[in-house]
Amino acid sequence: MQKLAAGNWKMNGNSAALTEVSALLDSHPAPACEMLLCPPATLIAQMAWAARGSVLKIGGQDCHAKASGAHTGDISAAMLQDAGASYVILGHSERRADHGETDAMVRAKAEAALAAGVTAVVCVGETEAQRDAGETLAVIGAQLEGSVPAGATAATLVVAYEPVWAIGTGRTPTIAQIAEVHAFLRARLTALIGAEAEGTRLLYGGSVKPSNAAEIFAVPHVDGALVGGASLKAADFGAIVAALSAA
Ligand code: PEP
């Protein structure tokens, strides 16, 4: 399995920010893990051009479940692919919260991604209230079961565990909490997709930074990270890539 360092730029960055891509590729031209950046849709084609001939993969942050049609403002998986994306983040907690995305919607989008040859990065994670209520594994299990697309394989699916309360807050779960959830995800995924679960990358996401990356990457069943804020700067994301390459 090739581990994956994925960056989610969210609604940040314009064409001037592409200097971060060249800086990242200058400092990490051949890391021992896969590198992925998911910029806003407006930057996908430009970033793909900036990354041409390199190991850096490009992804989208959402797609529509339909291949085309009267859906103003939306983008299909095939369009992402045409712009140079090979991955798409789906079901991020910000989209679940801001756009009311349900597990069924996430699954439909993920199936559209697979149909277009785009790998789906499906996000799951509990809120702080759900963790406090002891519901973490039940919530994550239900999200996984409801969101994983039919026919998913290790090559077409990545699962990101992102506790909602750890995103952008500087707070992270304990190592034991991450270990518990990732072992649970591997087992649940095996029940859902069989042997393909063994090679499916399970990412941790939520306030990953250069200072905590190495200890998170040492946790069993953590096969990489989905990084928000720290992916915007080549120096920080590069340090996380280096930590994953060394893990
Ligand atoms: C994210 O948005 O997926 C994320 C993990 O953000 P941050 O790293 O900033 O917490």
Image: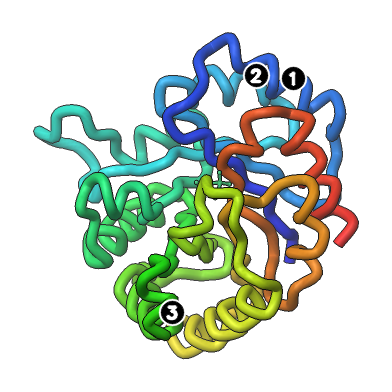
The quadrant of the picture occupied by the C terminus is bottom right
Residue type at the position of mark 3: Thr
The structure residue drawn at horizontal position 79% and vertical position 30%, both measured from the top left corner, is 235
Of marks 1 and 3, the one in the foreground: 3
103 relative position to 194: left or right:
left
Q: Position of residue 241 (x, y in %)?
A: 78, 45
Which image quadrant is residue 130 in? bottom left
Residue type at the position of mark 1: Ser
201 relative position to 211: left or right:
left
Between discs 1 and 3, the one toward the N terminus: 1
Query: Crowding at label 2, few (<14), some or many (≥20) Cα neighbours within 10 Å?
Result: some
The structure residue drawn at horizontal position 84% and vertical position 24%, both measured from the top left corner, is 26
Foreground: 82 or 132? 132
Q: Is residue 167 above or below residue 13?
A: below
Q: Position of residue 31 (x, y in %)?
A: 84, 44
Between discs 1 and 2, the one toward the N terminus: 1
Query: Crowding at label 1, few (<14), some or many (≥20) Cα neighbours within 10 Å?
Result: some
Query: Of helix, strand and loop, which one carries label 2?
Result: helix
Asked whether mark 2 lies closer than 8 Å to ligand 1, one says no
Q: Is residue 237 above or below residue 175?
A: above
Residue that lies at the very extreme toward the right in this rendered image: 246
Foreground: 191 or 138? 138
Residue 189 visible in the current orientation: yes
Q: Which residue is mark 2?
A: 50
Q: Quick check: marks 1 and 2 in contact, CB under 8 Å?
A: yes
Q: Which residue is mark 1?
A: 22
The quadrant of the picture occupied by the N terminus is bottom right
Query: Of helix, strand and loop, which one carries label 1?
Result: helix
Foreground: 147 or 162? 162
Q: Position of residue 93 (x, y in %)?
A: 37, 54
Q: Position of residue 59 (x, y in %)?
A: 51, 39
